[in-house]
Amino acid sequence: MTPPYWTQAAGELAANDPLMAELVKRYRGASLASRGDPFSTLARSIVGQQISVKAADTVWARFVERVGEITPRQLAQVGEEGLAGCGLSQRKIEYVSDLARHFLSGRLSPAHWADLDDEAIIAELVGVRGIGRWTAEMFLIFNLMRPDVFPVDDIGLQRAVFERYFDGAKQPRRLLAEYGDRWRPWRSVATWYLWRSLDPLPVAY
């Protein structure tokens, strides 16, 4: 489902930035999309850390086969011992188990996230072992579809900005963050288009 703000955001970005306008035109009709369920999205992000997309898909399939329905309660019932041999490292088994505990205890509660700003949600998410700021930002963009997230530590975003706006020259992180201010309040949308400039196939997390 296309985010309700997408048409407005793309139009404003295109009107204010000729290079962004080129991307908006090139990828007209495509947009950000959400995977849906918060718990399975976060679990999948942990499973896929530091391995290729192909490997992540393989491990995720084995994980789903072992667990069944991907819910906090079901994962807790399977337990850490039950996940042995499904392709996850011991550390990732501990991470997804900690994620389940956070959901079951109410320390992570998607029901109230609509009332929180981005930084408050990030603060909750990084309390889970194995979830850092980058993973939390990907969740804000791809699951909650928050419109103004700018993941300055994302390698793809850095590369796209440097190539399109600085003739390939790398810039300090601080300058990159400041440069992103031109795309407020639609930095998630600008990031999505910049990713497309490197890879025309949208990625979902």
Image: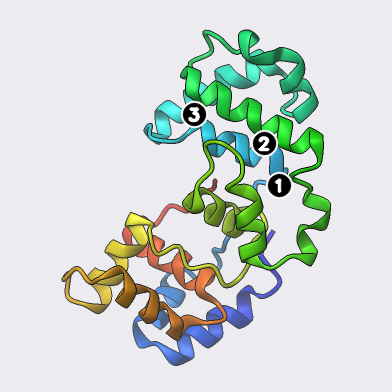
Circle 1 SS class: loop
* Left/right of residue 116 with respect to residue 29 in the rendered view: right
The answer to whether mark 1 and mark 2 are in CB contact below 8 A is: yes
Res 33 quadrant in image: bottom right
Q: For the residue carrying disc 2, how many other residues have a C-alpha within 10 Å: few (<14), some (14-19), or many (20+)?
A: some
Q: Which is more toward the observer, 126 or 150? A: 126
* Left/right of residue 18 with respect to residue 103 in the rendered view: left
- Give amino acid for label 3: Asp
- Give amino acid for label 2: Ser
Q: Which residue: 55% across, 25% down?
A: 60
Q: Which residue: 61% across, 45% down?
A: 127
Judging by the rendered image, the residue that carries numbered circle 1 is 36
Res 196 quadrant in image: bottom left
- Mark with earlier residue (3, 1): 1
Would you place residue 114 above or below residue 61 in this image?
Answer: below
Q: Which residue: 38% across, 35% down?
A: 50
Residue 187 x %, y %: 50, 74
Image mark count: 3
Judging by the rendered image, the residue that carries numbered circle 2 is 40
Q: Which is more toward the observer, 86 or 72? A: 72
Q: For the residue carrying disc 3, how many other residues have a C-alpha within 10 Å: few (<14), some (14-19), or many (20+)?
A: some
Marking on residue 57:
3
- Give amino acid for label 1: Gly
Work out how far the residue at label 2 is from the one at label 3, CA to CA, in angstroms: 13 Å
Q: Specify the color scheme.
A: rainbow
Residue 133 x %, y %: 50, 53
Closer to us: mark 2 or mark 3? 2
